[in-house]
Amino acid sequence: MPNLTTHFCNATFNNPLMNASGVHCMTIEEINQLAGSAAGSFVTKSATKAARIGNPEPRYINLSLGSINSMGLPNNGLSYYLEDAINRQKNAPDKAFILSVASYEGYHEYVENMKVIEESEYTGLVELNLSCPNVPGKPQMAYDFADTKRLLTDICAFYKKPFGVKLPPYFDLLHFDKMAEILNQFPIKFINSINSIGNGLYIDPKTDTVVIKPKAGFGGIGGEYVKPTALANVRAFYTRLRSDIEIIGTGGILSGQDAYEHLLCGATMLQIGTQLEKEGLTVFTRIQTELLKIMAEKGYQTIDEFRGKLKEIN
Ligand code: DHB
Protein backbone atom coordinates (compact mmCIF):
# COMPACT_ATOMS: atom_id res chain seq x y z
CA MET A 1 0.00 0.00 0.00
CA PRO A 2 1.54 3.38 -0.99
CA ASN A 3 1.78 6.24 1.50
CA LEU A 4 1.62 10.03 1.20
CA THR A 5 4.27 11.03 3.76
CA THR A 6 5.79 14.34 2.72
CA HIS A 7 8.90 16.27 3.77
CA PHE A 8 8.72 20.02 3.27
CA CYS A 9 10.96 22.73 4.72
CA ASN A 10 12.55 20.41 7.30
CA ALA A 11 9.19 19.18 8.60
CA THR A 12 7.34 15.92 8.02
CA PHE A 13 3.66 15.71 7.11
CA ASN A 14 1.27 12.79 6.96
CA ASN A 15 0.18 13.95 3.48
CA PRO A 16 0.77 16.99 1.23
CA LEU A 17 -2.76 18.44 1.34
CA MET A 18 -3.56 21.83 2.84
CA ASN A 19 -6.25 24.48 2.55
CA ALA A 20 -5.43 27.43 0.29
CA SER A 21 -5.23 30.67 2.23
CA GLY A 22 -8.56 32.45 2.48
CA VAL A 23 -10.65 29.31 2.73
CA HIS A 24 -11.65 28.04 6.21
CA CYS A 25 -8.86 29.87 8.04
CA MET A 26 -10.16 33.27 9.19
CA THR A 27 -10.85 32.40 12.84
CA ILE A 28 -9.06 30.28 15.43
CA GLU A 29 -12.11 28.02 15.44
CA GLU A 30 -11.74 27.36 11.68
CA ILE A 31 -7.98 26.91 12.05
CA ASN A 32 -8.57 24.36 14.83
CA GLN A 33 -10.93 22.47 12.53
CA LEU A 34 -8.25 22.36 9.82
CA ALA A 35 -5.62 21.27 12.35
CA GLY A 36 -7.90 18.42 13.41
CA SER A 37 -8.86 17.42 9.85
CA ALA A 38 -7.27 14.91 7.48
CA ALA A 39 -5.23 17.69 5.84
CA GLY A 40 -1.47 17.27 6.26
CA SER A 41 -1.09 20.91 7.25
CA PHE A 42 -2.80 24.30 6.92
CA VAL A 43 -2.20 27.96 6.18
CA THR A 44 -3.86 30.91 7.90
CA LYS A 45 -5.80 33.77 6.27
CA SER A 46 -3.44 36.41 4.90
CA ALA A 47 -3.03 38.90 7.72
CA THR A 48 -2.62 42.66 7.53
CA LYS A 49 -1.24 44.78 10.38
CA ALA A 50 -4.71 45.95 11.42
CA ALA A 51 -7.86 43.83 11.42
CA ARG A 52 -10.09 44.49 8.38
CA ILE A 53 -13.72 43.80 7.52
CA GLY A 54 -12.93 43.57 3.79
CA ASN A 55 -15.00 44.47 0.74
CA PRO A 56 -18.83 44.65 0.66
CA GLU A 57 -20.83 41.46 -0.03
CA PRO A 58 -21.53 39.57 -2.19
CA ARG A 59 -17.77 39.06 -2.52
CA TYR A 60 -17.31 35.29 -3.07
CA ILE A 61 -19.43 33.19 -5.45
CA ASN A 62 -19.08 29.53 -6.42
CA LEU A 63 -19.43 28.87 -10.17
CA SER A 64 -19.89 25.55 -11.91
CA LEU A 65 -16.27 25.60 -13.09
CA GLY A 66 -14.73 27.35 -10.09
CA SER A 67 -15.18 30.53 -8.11
CA ILE A 68 -14.80 34.31 -8.26
CA ASN A 69 -13.86 36.43 -5.25
CA SER A 70 -13.01 39.93 -4.23
CA MET A 71 -12.83 39.55 -0.47
CA GLY A 72 -10.60 42.58 0.10
CA LEU A 73 -8.43 41.05 2.83
CA PRO A 74 -10.94 40.63 5.65
CA ASN A 75 -8.89 39.29 8.57
CA ASN A 76 -8.44 39.58 12.33
CA GLY A 77 -5.09 41.35 12.15
CA LEU A 78 -1.54 40.01 12.32
CA SER A 79 -1.32 39.87 16.13
CA TYR A 80 -4.38 37.54 16.26
CA TYR A 81 -2.83 34.97 13.91
CA LEU A 82 0.69 35.40 15.31
CA GLU A 83 -0.35 34.84 18.94
CA ASP A 84 -2.32 31.77 17.93
CA ALA A 85 0.67 30.51 15.90
CA ILE A 86 2.98 30.92 18.89
CA ASN A 87 0.55 28.96 21.10
CA ARG A 88 0.29 26.19 18.52
CA GLN A 89 4.07 25.93 18.26
CA LYS A 90 4.31 25.56 22.04
CA ASN A 91 1.51 23.02 22.32
CA ALA A 92 2.33 20.91 19.25
CA PRO A 93 5.92 21.61 18.14
CA ASP A 94 5.87 18.74 15.61
CA LYS A 95 2.83 20.02 13.70
CA ALA A 96 4.21 22.53 11.23
CA PHE A 97 1.90 24.99 9.45
CA ILE A 98 2.16 28.26 7.55
CA LEU A 99 1.39 31.78 8.74
CA SER A 100 0.31 33.93 5.77
CA VAL A 101 1.18 37.62 5.78
CA ALA A 102 -0.03 40.27 3.37
CA SER A 103 -0.25 44.03 3.24
CA TYR A 104 -3.11 46.43 2.68
CA GLU A 105 -1.16 49.67 2.63
CA GLY A 106 1.58 48.45 0.28
CA TYR A 107 5.35 48.18 0.42
CA HIS A 108 6.09 49.51 3.91
CA GLU A 109 3.42 47.46 5.62
CA TYR A 110 4.98 44.27 4.19
CA VAL A 111 8.31 45.25 5.76
CA GLU A 112 6.70 46.20 9.09
CA ASN A 113 4.70 42.99 9.30
CA MET A 114 7.79 40.86 8.68
CA LYS A 115 9.63 42.85 11.40
CA VAL A 116 6.87 42.03 13.88
CA ILE A 117 7.23 38.33 13.08
CA GLU A 118 11.03 38.41 13.19
CA GLU A 119 10.88 39.96 16.67
CA SER A 120 8.27 37.47 17.91
CA GLU A 121 8.71 34.00 19.43
CA TYR A 122 7.29 32.36 16.28
CA THR A 123 9.94 30.37 14.45
CA GLY A 124 7.74 28.47 11.97
CA LEU A 125 7.04 28.94 8.28
CA VAL A 126 5.74 32.22 6.88
CA GLU A 127 4.21 32.80 3.48
CA LEU A 128 4.66 36.36 2.24
CA ASN A 129 1.67 36.98 0.00
CA LEU A 130 2.83 39.09 -2.94
CA SER A 131 -0.27 38.46 -5.02
CA CYS A 132 -3.56 39.66 -3.52
CA PRO A 133 -5.55 40.95 -6.52
CA ASN A 134 -8.48 42.47 -4.63
CA VAL A 135 -7.42 45.71 -3.01
CA PRO A 136 -8.89 48.60 -5.00
CA GLY A 137 -6.13 50.90 -6.21
CA LYS A 138 -3.29 48.57 -5.16
CA PRO A 139 -1.40 46.48 -7.74
CA GLN A 140 -0.27 42.90 -7.17
CA MET A 141 3.28 43.29 -5.85
CA ALA A 142 4.71 40.30 -7.71
CA TYR A 143 3.73 41.75 -11.11
CA ASP A 144 6.23 44.55 -10.42
CA PHE A 145 9.60 42.81 -10.78
CA ALA A 146 11.74 45.73 -9.60
CA ASP A 147 9.60 46.34 -6.49
CA THR A 148 9.58 42.63 -5.67
CA LYS A 149 13.37 42.52 -5.80
CA ARG A 150 13.65 45.65 -3.65
CA LEU A 151 11.13 44.30 -1.13
CA LEU A 152 12.90 40.94 -0.80
CA THR A 153 16.23 42.76 -0.41
CA ASP A 154 14.81 44.93 2.39
CA ILE A 155 13.15 42.00 4.15
CA CYS A 156 16.09 39.61 3.88
CA ALA A 157 18.35 42.25 5.45
CA PHE A 158 16.68 41.57 8.83
CA TYR A 159 14.40 38.53 8.46
CA LYS A 160 16.23 35.31 9.42
CA LYS A 161 13.39 32.80 9.84
CA PRO A 162 12.16 30.40 7.13
CA PHE A 163 9.78 31.99 4.64
CA GLY A 164 8.42 31.67 1.12
CA VAL A 165 6.35 33.76 -1.27
CA LYS A 166 2.86 33.35 -2.71
CA LEU A 167 2.95 34.24 -6.38
CA PRO A 168 0.31 35.29 -8.89
CA PRO A 169 0.07 33.35 -12.15
CA TYR A 170 2.43 34.40 -14.95
CA PHE A 171 1.59 33.92 -18.61
CA ASP A 172 4.82 34.61 -20.45
CA LEU A 173 7.98 32.51 -20.51
CA LEU A 174 10.13 35.60 -20.10
CA HIS A 175 8.21 36.50 -16.95
CA PHE A 176 8.94 33.02 -15.54
CA ASP A 177 12.62 33.56 -16.36
CA LYS A 178 12.68 37.01 -14.82
CA MET A 179 10.85 36.13 -11.58
CA ALA A 180 12.87 32.93 -11.09
CA GLU A 181 16.09 34.87 -11.61
CA ILE A 182 15.03 37.29 -8.86
CA LEU A 183 13.83 34.61 -6.42
CA ASN A 184 17.02 32.58 -6.87
CA GLN A 185 18.98 35.50 -5.36
CA PHE A 186 17.22 35.25 -1.99
CA PRO A 187 17.25 32.68 0.83
CA ILE A 188 13.57 31.79 0.40
CA LYS A 189 12.56 28.24 1.31
CA PHE A 190 9.51 27.86 -0.94
CA ILE A 191 7.12 29.44 -3.39
CA ASN A 192 3.37 28.93 -3.55
CA SER A 193 2.02 29.00 -7.10
CA ILE A 194 -0.62 30.12 -7.97
CA ASN A 195 -2.87 32.68 -6.38
CA SER A 196 -6.18 33.22 -8.19
CA ILE A 197 -6.12 34.48 -11.77
CA GLY A 198 -6.74 38.12 -10.92
CA ASN A 199 -9.56 40.30 -12.15
CA GLY A 200 -11.73 37.94 -14.12
CA LEU A 201 -15.38 38.76 -14.78
CA TYR A 202 -18.35 36.41 -14.48
CA ILE A 203 -21.79 37.37 -15.81
CA ASP A 204 -25.09 35.86 -14.67
CA PRO A 205 -26.77 34.94 -18.00
CA LYS A 206 -30.29 35.32 -16.58
CA THR A 207 -29.87 38.87 -15.30
CA ASP A 208 -26.99 40.25 -17.42
CA THR A 209 -25.38 41.22 -14.13
CA VAL A 210 -22.02 40.68 -12.51
CA VAL A 211 -22.09 38.30 -9.51
CA ILE A 212 -19.92 40.08 -6.93
CA LYS A 213 -20.27 43.66 -5.71
CA PRO A 214 -16.71 45.03 -5.29
CA LYS A 215 -14.71 46.43 -8.20
CA ALA A 216 -17.65 46.37 -10.66
CA GLY A 217 -17.71 42.56 -10.55
CA PHE A 218 -14.02 41.94 -11.24
CA GLY A 219 -12.46 39.26 -9.02
CA GLY A 220 -9.92 36.48 -8.63
CA ILE A 221 -10.77 33.25 -10.45
CA GLY A 222 -10.13 29.85 -8.86
CA GLY A 223 -11.08 26.21 -9.36
CA GLU A 224 -11.31 24.17 -12.55
CA TYR A 225 -10.79 27.26 -14.73
CA VAL A 226 -7.23 27.72 -13.47
CA LYS A 227 -5.66 24.23 -13.47
CA PRO A 228 -3.69 24.50 -16.76
CA THR A 229 -2.30 27.88 -15.68
CA ALA A 230 -1.43 26.52 -12.22
CA LEU A 231 0.33 23.44 -13.64
CA ALA A 232 2.31 25.61 -16.06
CA ASN A 233 3.42 27.91 -13.25
CA VAL A 234 4.44 25.01 -10.97
CA ARG A 235 6.36 23.39 -13.84
CA ALA A 236 7.96 26.62 -15.03
CA PHE A 237 9.28 27.44 -11.56
CA TYR A 238 10.30 23.84 -10.80
CA THR A 239 12.54 23.91 -13.86
CA ARG A 240 13.97 27.38 -13.11
CA LEU A 241 14.36 27.73 -9.32
CA ARG A 242 17.28 26.54 -7.19
CA SER A 243 16.72 22.91 -6.23
CA ASP A 244 16.47 23.82 -2.52
CA ILE A 245 13.42 26.04 -3.12
CA GLU A 246 10.35 23.84 -2.68
CA ILE A 247 6.99 24.41 -4.35
CA ILE A 248 3.45 24.48 -3.03
CA GLY A 249 1.11 23.74 -5.94
CA THR A 250 -2.22 25.53 -5.75
CA GLY A 251 -4.94 25.88 -8.37
CA GLY A 252 -7.57 23.60 -9.78
CA ILE A 253 -7.14 20.63 -7.46
CA LEU A 254 -10.54 18.92 -7.39
CA SER A 255 -9.48 15.27 -7.59
CA GLY A 256 -6.65 12.84 -6.91
CA GLN A 257 -5.71 13.14 -10.59
CA ASP A 258 -5.33 16.94 -10.26
CA ALA A 259 -3.17 16.42 -7.15
CA TYR A 260 -1.09 13.82 -9.01
CA GLU A 261 -0.51 16.24 -11.93
CA HIS A 262 0.68 19.02 -9.59
CA LEU A 263 3.14 16.54 -8.01
CA LEU A 264 4.34 15.42 -11.48
CA CYS A 265 5.05 19.08 -12.28
CA GLY A 266 7.23 19.29 -9.16
CA ALA A 267 5.01 20.46 -6.29
CA THR A 268 5.73 19.16 -2.77
CA MET A 269 2.70 20.47 -0.86
CA LEU A 270 -0.75 20.93 -2.45
CA GLN A 271 -3.35 23.52 -1.52
CA ILE A 272 -7.07 23.36 -2.13
CA GLY A 273 -9.19 26.52 -2.14
CA THR A 274 -12.34 26.53 -4.23
CA GLN A 275 -13.05 22.81 -3.84
CA LEU A 276 -12.61 23.03 -0.05
CA GLU A 277 -15.09 25.90 -0.02
CA LYS A 278 -17.55 23.86 -2.10
CA GLU A 279 -17.14 20.46 -0.46
CA GLY A 280 -15.94 21.12 3.09
CA LEU A 281 -13.24 19.36 5.10
CA THR A 282 -14.06 15.88 3.76
CA VAL A 283 -12.34 16.93 0.50
CA PHE A 284 -9.03 16.01 2.14
CA THR A 285 -9.89 12.34 2.74
CA ARG A 286 -11.50 11.98 -0.69
CA ILE A 287 -8.49 13.37 -2.56
CA GLN A 288 -6.05 11.28 -0.50
CA THR A 289 -8.01 8.13 -1.34
CA GLU A 290 -8.07 9.03 -5.05
CA LEU A 291 -4.35 9.88 -5.10
CA LEU A 292 -3.39 6.63 -3.32
CA LYS A 293 -5.42 4.67 -5.87
CA ILE A 294 -3.58 6.31 -8.79
CA MET A 295 -0.22 5.61 -7.10
CA ALA A 296 -1.15 1.96 -6.51
CA GLU A 297 -2.25 1.54 -10.16
CA LYS A 298 1.04 3.02 -11.38
CA GLY A 299 3.12 0.97 -8.93
CA TYR A 300 4.44 3.86 -6.81
CA GLN A 301 5.00 3.46 -3.07
CA THR A 302 5.95 7.07 -2.34
CA ILE A 303 5.41 10.50 -3.89
CA ASP A 304 9.17 10.99 -4.22
CA GLU A 305 9.23 8.26 -6.91
CA PHE A 306 7.30 10.47 -9.36
CA ARG A 307 7.52 14.06 -8.09
CA GLY A 308 8.75 16.35 -10.88
CA LYS A 309 8.95 13.48 -13.38
CA LEU A 310 6.62 14.93 -15.99
CA LYS A 311 7.46 13.47 -19.41
CA GLU A 312 8.02 15.58 -22.51
CA ILE A 313 7.65 14.51 -26.14
CA ASN A 314 11.01 14.07 -27.89
C1 DHB B 1 -7.53 38.16 -0.83
C2 DHB B 1 -7.49 37.48 -2.01
C3 DHB B 1 -6.31 36.88 -2.41
O1 DHB B 1 -6.22 36.19 -3.57
C4 DHB B 1 -5.20 36.97 -1.60
O2 DHB B 1 -4.06 36.40 -1.98
C5 DHB B 1 -5.25 37.66 -0.40
C6 DHB B 1 -6.44 38.25 -0.02
C7 DHB B 1 -8.77 38.83 -0.43
O3 DHB B 1 -9.45 39.39 -1.28
O4 DHB B 1 -9.06 38.85 0.79
Image (cartoon, helix red, strand yellow):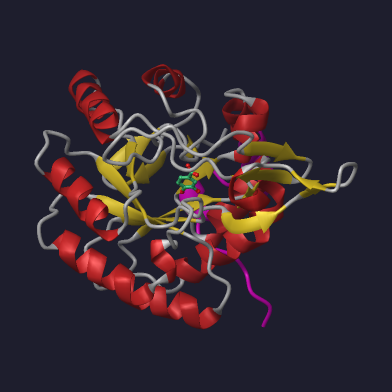
For the C terminus, give its image quadrant: bottom right
Extreme residue toward the right, this view: 206
Whether 32 is drawn above or below 234: the answer is above
Question: At which x and y percent is residue 231?
Answer: 59, 60
Foreground residue among 239 and 149: 149
**Which residue occupies 41% across, 16% down?**
29
Q: Is 15 above or below relative to 80?
A: below
> Residue visible at 33% across and 61% down?
245
In the rendered image, residue 200, in percent from the top left (x then y), is placed at 66, 57
Q: Which residues are magenta?
A: 290-314
> As rendered, which of 85 and 136 lies closer to the eye?
136
Is residue 153 part of the magenta span, yes or no?
A: no
Residue 175 lies left or right of residue 230; in this view the side is left
Which residue does the image show at 71% across and 49% down from the upper left? 224
**Quadrant in the picture for residue 117:** top left
The percent position of residue 285, horizontal first and vertical second, equals: 59, 26
